Image: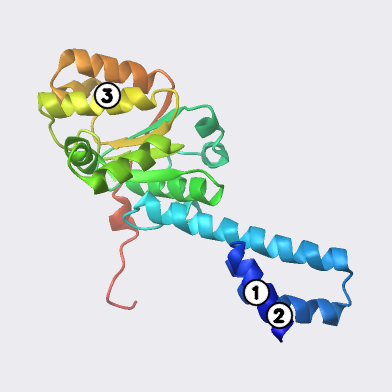
Amino acid sequence: MEQLKEVQGIMQELRLSATAKEIPTLIQQANTDASTYGDFILTVMRYEQQSRAEKARLRRLTWAALPYQRSLDEFDLEVQTALTQKQMNELRSLNWVDQSYNLILLGPTGVGKTFLSIGLCVEAIEKGYSALFITIGDLVKLLKTEAISRQSQVRLRRLYKADLIVLDDLMFMALDKQEANFFFHFINKLYEQTSFVITSNKSPEQWGEVIGDEIITGAFLDRMVQKSQIIELTGESYRVTHRQTIFSD
């Protein structure tokens, strides 16, 4: 018993906290299986490795700040026919993230733009990428308060280090000149470094109406659309099609 406590104490000192808690069970299992010393050490190391990977995944999921969680397995391609199964598979591969490509999802409210973007965000997190979700309104607020808010600084640092950023509801709100400048410098800083998934109910040709500044709009489009895949989602509202009812059949 004393020996076990000493082992656990050393593990905690070495920051092997997850394994320190599990080591009694691992020792018991090794005795039952008559494991060799080498097998036992490998089992211990694998347990700690898996525990750390899971902690990292949960941390990335928390930092993503998703409004809700959805898996791409739940995205109904029979309802949203703008995407084929092959195209969905290509999106799920995330090869485009490795190449810093952008994905622009267009369409009216309710056709699944945010659903799909969240699913891609979750898929990226599960595969070890840093992926974050933010609306255009929240992003502008962070940029405007960066100099005075510690919370804004922390969140922006995470955005600057992200592999994938979901920018939801682009062009949902009009930007004044200062906001447009802040927004452009943010995009420019991450150009060819980070992949974006952008959702919008307006086509790129209409974005200038909201950004206002013609020069900034042109520079933004040049950086965002140059390496991008535009997908126009169509059909009935996804929320209406998949609505829940309080009545049974």
Image check: 73 left or right of 149? right
CA neighbours of label 3 inside 10 A, class few (<14), some (14 to 19), many (20+): some
Which residue corresponds to mark 3? 185
Q: Inspect this view and state whether residue 201 appears.
A: yes
Which amino acid, by three-letter code, is at mark 3? Answer: His
Which residue corresponds to mark 2? 4
Which amino acid, by three-letter code, is at mark 1? Answer: Gln
Q: Nearer the viewer, residue 33 or 136?
A: 33
Q: Nearer the viewer, residue 115 or 156?
A: 156
Residue 9 position by quadrant: bottom right
Residue 4 position by quadrant: bottom right
Q: Determine the secondary structure under disc 1.
A: helix
CA neighbours of label 2 inside 10 A, class few (<14), some (14 to 19), many (20+): few
Residue 224 percent location from the top left of the image: 35, 23
Which residue corresponds to mark 1? 8
Residue 178 percent location from the top left of the image: 13, 26
Are discs 2 and 1 less than 8 Å apart at CB?
A: yes
Residue 167 percent location from the top left of the image: 31, 38
Which amino acid, by three-letter code, is at mark 2? Answer: Leu
Name which residue lies at 35% across and 45% down: 133
Residue 229 percent location from the top left of the image: 43, 27
Q: Nearer the viewer, mark 2 or mark 3?
A: 2
Q: Can you say which quadrant of the picture contains the N terminus?
A: bottom right
Q: Tell me: residue 78, above or below residue 26.
A: above
Q: Which mark is residue 220?
A: none
Q: CA distance from mark 2 to mark 1?
A: 6 Å
Mark 2 vs mark 3: which is more N-terminal?
Answer: 2
Q: Inspect this view and state whether residue 70 appears.
A: no
